[in-house]
Amino acid sequence: MKSVKRIFVAMIAVLAISATASAQLSFGVKAGLKVNKISFDEKALASDNQAGFTGGVMAEFMLPVLNLGVDASLMYVHNKVNVGVDGFEGGVDKARSYIEVPVNLKWKIGLPIAGNIVSPYIFTGPCFSFLAGKAEIEEALKEKKVDVSWNVGVGVQLLRKLQISAGYGFGLNNTLEIAGVDGNWTDIDGKRNCWTITAAYLF
């Protein structure tokens, strides 16, 4: 029995070493479109879909044997936020910039014949968004400095170089604060959800 266990452990070790040895680390550039909407439970507040652009760099680490990997990006995002507050006709329209760091677990679906030409994949993972610039929208309304969301999406890799993907981010934390009569800031029950469509080129 001990010999069987040793052989089994040795086989796992060999597979792990082989997978690590054949691991692929790639770097690339990425750009695309990002559409945000803040989902409120407060009846006095509303927001419209706001489109913006995103661009940055990425790294991908893949284990070909398992077709599993991780990709991480450092992205600049610029868009507008339009929040309608009771008493402000038409809402408040402000440009906003963010630095985003999405980290995704990725699974590439290997195709027997066309794998080198086209390879679909799915991904999921957290995204951390850091507000760059002023947080205030109005005197009584401001954005949080950090947003956290969870991404899910699909994509396709072409010729091992070009990746096109579409994903949706579910906001995990409240994104806005409002000033109270006591001068303290209170969270508004509103989360930022977003669609992201990107194209990336791997070197």
Image (cartoon, rainbow, N blue to C red):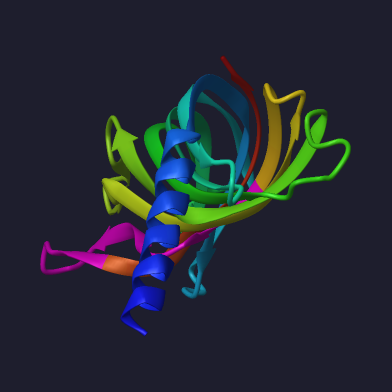
Q: Is residue 85 visible?
A: no
Residue 198 point in image, percent of width and height: 65, 32
Secondary structure predominantly adopted by residues drawn in magenta: strand
Quadrant (top left, top right, bottom left, bottom right) of the N terminus? bottom left
Residue at figure coordinates x 41%, y 76% from the top left: 4
Residue 38 point in image, percent of width and height: 52, 57
Residue at figure coordinates x 59%, y 47% from the top left: 65
Taking 137 as reference, is 12 above or below it?
below
Taking 105 as reference, is 201 above or below it?
above
**Residue closer to the observer: 196 or 15:** 15
Q: Can residue 64 be seen in this view?
A: yes
In magenta segment, residue 175: yes
**Residue closer to the observer: 112 or 16:** 16
Residue 30 lies in what quarter of the image?
top right
Residue at figure coordinates x 13%, y 64% from the top left: 184
Q: Residue 149 vs residue 194: left or right?
A: left
Residue 85 point in image, percent of width and height: 46, 58
Taking 95 as reference, is 191 above or below it?
below
**Residue closer to the observer: 165 or 43:** 165
**Residue closer to the observer: 136 or 3:** 3
Q: How many labels does the image show?
A: 0
Residue 143 point in image, percent of width and height: 32, 49
Report the magenta residues as a range. 167-186
Q: Residue 84 vs residue 175: left or right?
A: right
In magenta segment, residue 172: yes
Quadrant (top left, top right, bottom left, bottom right) of the C terminus? top right
